[in-house]
Amino acid sequence: MKVLIVGDIVGRSGLDRLKKELSNRRNDYDFCIVNGENSASGRGIRTKEYNEILEAGADIITMGNHMYYRKEMASEYAKLKRLVIPANITNLVGNKHVIITKNNIKFGVINILGTFGMGEMVEKNLVSPFKVIDDEVEELKKNNVDYIFIDFHAEATAEKIIMGHYLKDRVNCVYGTHTHVQTADERIFDTGMAYITDVGMTGPKDSVIGLKLEVALERYTTEKYVHYECSKNEAIFNAIEVEFDDNTKKAISIRRINE
Ligand SMILES: [Fe+2]
Ligand SMILES: [Fe+2]
């Protein structure tokens, strides 16, 4: 069983690159998870991008802190059946996990937010990921899912590594998103769980994690607030490919894609 997991889609160029890549490779995989938290011009997701990502070939879309910037979407998330919102957010309504069955294989996906560097607005509406993850995993186990994937959307590398160790006996893959920079620490734990600290982003290459370079330069060199502007530059494609043994459900390989 082979899975493709794509890192944060940033803006129009990221979406276009996703479509191109999935039209070429989607048939190579049994299941595909995409993080769409920056697909609407870098800030959150709308129903339009949700539909585009699913039509491109994703099975499940995960989220992150940027969903807070789309206030008009707050009443919509719960209607989007294949969207997973962070399980430890206390003030937004949506799916805290999603289960889907494809070709007689039952997949469960959980999204969870880290507690560092998420901004005041987000942090005040969060509980510790370690306080909610047990219940979410337990819920999926009760539903007899074959594979459990965790998108841990977090800034701090240590927090993500700890989550990997915490869950290594209970789930099939823990992967990080949010930093938009792919890490080179992919591994398979002795329990057969695949892990990487960050998948990276599918978004504008010559940018500052998606932010237009000129805007970033002004913001950081003058220390003045400059309004966010998503870069329109050509996008890189960041993803991981994970293969599992069909009988044991243990990971056989994890491979980074950075093209
Ligand atoms: Fe992101
Ligand atoms: Fe994020």
Image (cartoon, helix red, strand yellow):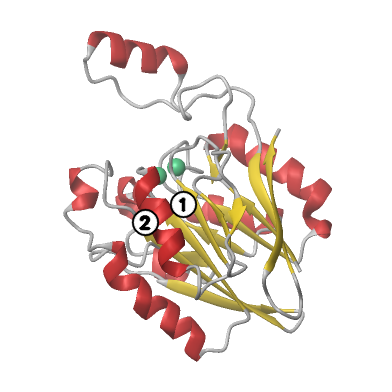
Residue 12 lies, with reference to residue 52, above or below; the image says: above
Residue located 51% across and 72% down the image: 81
Quadrant of the snapshot with the C terminus? top right
Neighbour class for label 2 at 10 Å: few (<14), some, many (≥20)?
Answer: some
Kindly identify which residue carries mark 1. 46
Residue type at mark 2: give it. Answer: Met
Q: Nearest the camera: 17 or 137?
A: 137
Residue type at mark 1: give it. Answer: Arg
Question: Which of the two discs, 2 and 1, labels the residue nearer the N terminus?
Answer: 1
Question: Is the CB atom of the residue marked by disc 1 within 8 angstroms of ligand 1's nearest atom?
Answer: no
- Give percent across and percent down for residue 52: 62, 52
Question: Is the CB atom of the residue marked by disc 2 within 8 angstroms of ligand 2's nearest atom?
Answer: no
Kindly identify which residue carries mark 2. 73
- The circle on residue 5 is none
- Find residue 86 and report its image quarter: bottom left
- Is residue 45 visible in the rendered structure shown here? yes
Neighbour class for label 1 at 10 Å: few (<14), some, many (≥20)?
Answer: some
Q: Is residue 232 left or right of residue 160?
A: right
Residue 120 lies, with reference to residue 107, above or below; the image says: above
Residue located 43% across and 44% down the image: 178
Task: Tell me whether the residue at label 2 lies in contact with that at label 1, contact meaning CB atoms closer than 8 angstroms.
Answer: yes
Element class at badge 1: loop
Residue 104 lies, with reference to residue 42, above or below; the image says: below
- Give percent across and percent down for residue 223: 22, 14
Q: Is residue 9 left or right of residue 136?
A: right
